[in-house]
Image (cartoon, grey):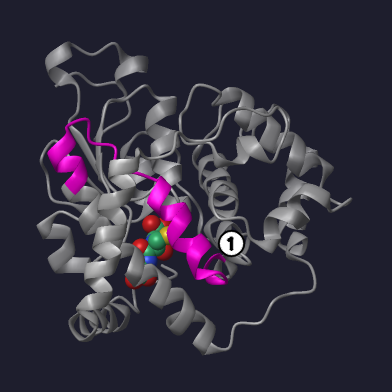
Amino acid sequence: MASCGLSPTRAVNECKLPANDIPKIKLYGNDHSPWVQAIMLGLHEKGMEYTRSTFPPLEVFKKWGPMMPAASIDDGPWFLESKEILQRLGYSKVSEEDMLAVRRSWSGVMHRADYWPRFFGEFSLASDPNDSFVPRFVGNFLRALTILYFFCLIRFGVIARGYQDPDNHGDAFIEWENRFSLMQGRFLTGDKPDSVDLLLFGIVQCHCSIPVPTLFDLQSDPRLPRTREWIGNMQAHFSNYGSLYSNIYFAPHGPGPKPAKGVDQFAFWLGIIIGIACLPVTIAVIAFFIYRNRNLRGA
Ligand SMILES: N[C@@H](CCC(=O)N[C@@H](CS)C(=O)NCC(=O)O)C(=O)O
């Protein structure tokens, strides 16, 4: 295997590896998830080919239910954790402090489920990306069940634990604003985005994929000009990446992600209806994984 210093994974565009050394990367996850977004952005940045499914492969489902993102490299075992996946793709190690600061900026995420028609409606538009009709139809049908899971997780798992809003969600970005004002280049680590840029920008995409109050604070808080400038830098840098929900809300504006075709939305809603029709089973499976995944949350 050719070595490019990015072991154990090889970054194809930077290392000019022979074609047969191109890693086979499989990703499970939905592009509304900040952590999945970070991986997708990271793969895009390095020009790495990958396949993505929006319903967990059996191995993932048995171990972690709908928990995302999960990745498999060269048909190796699936593994979790965005920061580990990014590191395997050749990005810098993320410190615990940075990870906690990124997680703090997820403030307000539970408002995604405030209006259930909007929650499910926005997810219906985020199609499974498979090019072939039948697997995509099945993927959209099955992923509806994971979205029911996330709805219950937010409504009953997180809010039930006594979540309280801060006065201003912009507060969570003040620490980033300070870092942006000290930055030497356009990104946190210079002229190219690295892990922390990708993870934080993933959070911004999540806030924009179903608008939550944090988004309005990010747009308007007078204390956050450098944050908006950094978002603009990231958008310009990723201008040909297809899953930028923030394009709608921040300059330089651009098109948002392409919405699912009608038939793909139909498959999704069919999955929701069947999931609700089988409510006792659906609730039992959801409750099982909400409980079983409790130690993975916030890792
Ligand atoms: N520490 C994980 C967090 C991943 C995470 O929280 N994923 C959410 C979706 S955005 C999830 O799958 N939650 C399912 C659960 O908590 O059971 C990472 O960085 O990858």
What residue appears at the point 62 percent right and 27 percent down from the top-left corner? 254
What residue appears at the point 32 percent right and 57 percent down from the top-left corner? 68
What residue appears at the point 51 percent right and 54 percent down from the top-left corner? 95
Q: What stretch is highlighted in magenta?
A: 112-137
For ligand 1, the image quadrant comes to bottom left
Residue 245 x/y as whole percent: 55, 41
Picture quadrant where residue 183 is located: top right
What residue appears at the point 59 percent right and 69 percent down from the top-left corner? 111
15 inside magenta stretch = no
Q: Is residue 249 left or right of residue 158?
A: right
116 inside magenta stretch = yes
In the rendered view, tell whether residue 54 sits above or below residue 3: below
Q: In this view, does 167 lie to the left or right of 280?
A: right
Q: Is mark 1 on a helix, strand or loop?
A: loop
Disc 1 designates what residue?
106
Residue 50 x/y as whole percent: 25, 31
* The C terminus, quarter of image: bottom left
Q: Can residue 191 be seen in this view?
A: no
In the rendered view, tell whether residue 205 sits above or below residue 163: above
Amino acid type, label 1: Trp
The residue lying toward the viewer, choosing from 18 and 231, is 231
* The N terminus, quarter of image: top left
Examine the residues drawn in magenta and state their main secondary structure: helix
Q: Can residue 203 be seen in this view?
A: yes
Residue 118 x/y as whole percent: 52, 61
